[in-house]
Image (cartoon, grey):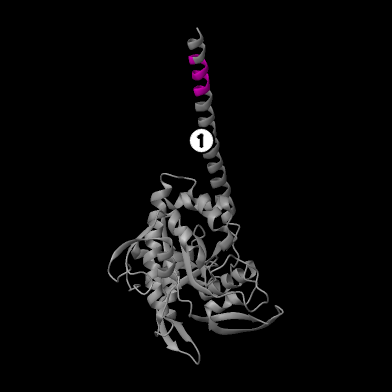
Amino acid sequence: MTKLIRKKHLQQIAFIAAFLLLFLTSAVFLLFIFMRNSGRKNLQKNVITASAVPTIAEGETGSENNIVTWQSGWVMHNGEIYQYNDSILTFLIMGIDSKTEVKEATDSVHGGQSDAMLLVVMNPDNKTIKLVNINRNVMTDIDIYNYLGQFVITTKAQLALQHGYGDGLELSCERTVKAVSNLFYGIPIHGYCAVNYVAIPTINDLAGGVTVTLLDDFTFFDKSMVKGSTLKLSGKQAFKYVQYRDTKMFNSVAVRMERIKQYLMSLVNALKGKMKSDITLPAKLYEAIFPYMVTNISLDEIIYLASEALSYEIDIEQFYSLEGETKQGELYEEFYADEDYLYDLIIELFYEQVNQ
């Protein structure tokens, strides 16, 4: 009789444990769904900079038998009419050249440089994610401030410098977003994320390591990092691979950009693979790098974006870099974007053709 009672007792415990496990799993799943839906609703409200998109004067266009009344927001390009695609979500990712946790700058001129910048363009219409690598040295309008945070002048300078004229936190990011938006003819940007380079090992290891074929030789740092070899990078190796550039070599930014481009594509694939078996990965990643990150993208928005990205197509052919020419300035290198290429790229990524 005692054994029977004990058996029933164990069965009850097992049933309760199974029920609790099911309840907790369901709760996590429902929380995930709630946060995902909440994130989707909030993202379109997050636009920081939405300057007027490039247009020509309103009027009528077309042949005598096919007159089209011009609509506000339309763009004429290569004889075709386009309009901005409002369903697109665009984000600016910044890599900040810092090896510490995020902290407020001591004044308004030492906010740190945005050493790498990436536009992430999500198009829900065709389920694609396209990436645009922005040269840190691209010459564009940036706002200069003095030590007290007072505006001084808007001038042409390297884009990377804009982040420095701020607090090293949200203000620095917002000013960089404005400069990038203006560079891209006023495209709306729905969110930003600035991550100190020191977070790379954490991101890399949460992805389970990232495998790349080394584009450059890093044996000065690690004897196993031979150019042309294929390695699953550890966190420390990934940090060096992405962050390092030989400042004595002309146009070293372009060399590093190719490594960043390669690493990011492998990282995205690794994260997508891990997330298929662990839907909580975005939350874990968000929590792990939070001390090294400044962002206006909330956790529920991160969860929505990450879950959406699983069904989106992203490949190396959809990774763009600004075309142009690097010149030696008085002190530092300066990159001048090809304006025709930039305009074509903006039309391709952010506009859709108007059916006449």
Residue at the left extreme? 228
Locate residue 61 relative to residue 45 in the image: left or right: left
Please provide percent x and percent y for residue 68. Answer: 47, 67
Q: Dot 1 surroundings within 10 Å: few (below 14), some, or many (20 or more)?
A: few
Foreground pick, 140 / 55: 140
Residue 219 image-quadrant placement: bottom left
Residue 112's x, y, as percent? 58, 74
State whether residue 90 appears in this view: yes
Residue 330 position within the rendered picture, expressed as x and y whole percent measured from the top left: 50, 92
Give the left or right position of residue 170, taking residue 217 as reference.
right
**Residue sitting at x 43%, y 48%:** 275
**Residue under pointer 1:** 25
Residue 266 sits in quarter: bottom left
257 on left or right of 25: left
Residue at the outermost front position? 2
Q: Main secondary structure of the magenta part?
A: helix
- The reply to whether the magenta stretch includes residue 10 is yes
Instruction: Measuring from the top left, give residue 37's x and y in whole percent.
Output: 55, 46
